Every structure is written in structure tokens, then in C-alpha cells.
Image (cartoon, rainbow, N blue to C red):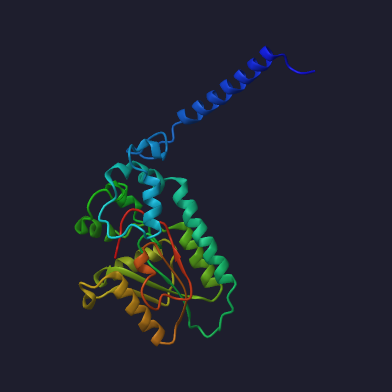
Amino acid sequence: MGLEPFSFFLFLATLALVAATSRGTYLEIPHQIHLLRPKSGARTNDVPDLSCLSWRLAVETNNIIGWKTIPEKCEGYLGHYMLGQQYREDSEAVAYEAILYAQSLELAGDGKDIWIFDIDETSLSNLPYYAKHGFGVEPFNSTLFNEWVNKGEAPSLPESLKLYKKLLSLGIKIVFLTGRPEDQRSVTENNLKNVGFYTWENLILKGSSYSGETAVAYKSNERKRLEKKGYRIIGNIGDQWSDLLGTNAGNRTFKLPDPMYYIS
């Protein structure tokens, strides 16, 4: 038996009310994950006249380059992203693909197959520091950042640590290639070991001879030196495009998310 027109109207109205009520309840659930972060989550309409989601996408695809700080209006959005689940899920997706690729390789077994890891925002996370400094909205302060680094308290990026352990189990050796200066070698070694990166083939830090050089130039040259020693770079992972561009980048590269800062 069909519904009478009035009854059918009431039925539709009831459905609409239920849907609206459910939607309102969802949006009212607090999602605050940081004292400075918006309770309603990372919705683009929280930032009038600027789509921070689109800005982050353009940054991650290297379409926006040479920027010094994140847009001021995007501090809340990026804070929610970095401290929320999405950043972890994005990192996990990258690490998962890297593991699939590594498992598909036929290794020579001569100890010359290496995988290059960047350190900051790749192996070690500086989120405790950036959470106190606007997630990139503040201009970079080398003095304050180095004070943080020298504490040696940076946690691991869990997804990268998982990849690291898997690569070791496959017989692939690890080379860390970082823009950190040579005088931070000891604290960097200890920090890596304390969070689970306990062994590596080489740890390359930026020497004074590279003063004034871009990260692309520095890392390209160091990768070239590794290959001249007979190593094969079968993989390369970093959070900056400057970790992956240039020469001798490896057979395959993997870009981790990092919308907080840009290094050329």
C-alpha cells in the first residue's frame, strides 16, 4: 500500500530532520587536539578566503616553492593536520609503498645496496618544537631550533622506523644524509639510537665546505660520492623535495609529507 501524499511529506520531513540532527551532532563533537587548534577540525571554511588544504597540496607537489613561512591563516589548519591522524596516515601510505617496492627487489647480496634516509621530519620528528612555534608560521630561528636539536629528545617518525626495520631485515643497508651540521653528530647519533635507529652504514652531516650551497647541491654531491664507492642507491626517502631532486637520487624516491617548512 502506498503512502498518502501528506504522510509521504511527513516521512520526508522526518528523514531530513534526522539527517540534520546527526550532522549537527557530529560537528559539535569537540576535536581539539592542541590548545591552539580549532575544536571543529581542519575544515577549509574555518579559514576565510584561503583554502589551506589546496595550499598544502600545492606545497607537497612542489608547485609552491621558495616560501619562508606558512600563511598565517593556515596555522590552525596545519596544526590540526600535523598533530592529527591524517599526517600519520599520509606517512603510513608512503612507508607502505616503500616497503612493497623494497620487497619486490632482487638484491645482489654484496652489501652495496643502500637506502638513503633524511633525518629531520623523516627519521626524527621535530613536532614538539614546531608545535610551540606555530607549525611554520613563525620565521625559522636557527638558535632556538639548534637548542631543541641539542637536547636530543626528538621522537622517531613511527612509519619511517617501521620502514627502516623492514629494510634491514631484507639486507638493505641504511645511509643517513642530513643537513644537520657536523658539530651535531654526537647528539644526532645518540638521538637516533635512543628511538630505535640503532645501526647504519654511514651518517653524513653537512660539513663546512658546503657553506652557502643548497641542499640539492650538497645532497647530490654526497650521493655521487657514495656511488663512486660502489654503492647502489636503490631507495631514497625524505620530507623535502631537495632530499630527492638533483643528481644520483636513486632508483626510486619517496616523499613524506611536511607542509611546515621549505628547504631549497
Residue 241 on image: x %, y %: 37, 65
Residue situated furthest front in the rendering: 5
Number of marks in picture = 0
Within the image, what quadrant is residue 97 found in? bottom right
Residue 110 on image: x %, y %: 52, 86
Within the image, what quadrant is residue 38 found in? top left
Q: Residue at x 43, y 60 (%)?
A: 256
Location of the C terminus (image quadrant):
bottom left
Asked whether, in this view, residue 174 is left or right of residue 264, the answer is: right
Q: Residue at x 36, y 40 (%)?
A: 34
Residue situated furthest right in the rendering: 1
Location of the N terminus (image quadrant):
top right
Asked whether, in this view, residue 44 is left or right of residue 105, the answer is: left
Q: Is residue 117 above or below residue 2?
A: below
Asked whether, in this view, residue 83 is left or right of residue 143, the answer is: right
Q: Residue at x 47, y 46 (%)?
A: 85
Res 64 visible: yes
Q: Is residue 30 above or below residue 133?
A: above
Residue 163 on image: x %, y %: 50, 65
Judging depth in this view, the residue of 24 and 199 nearest the camera is 24
Res 258 visible: no
Q: Residue at x 39, y 34 (%)?
A: 39
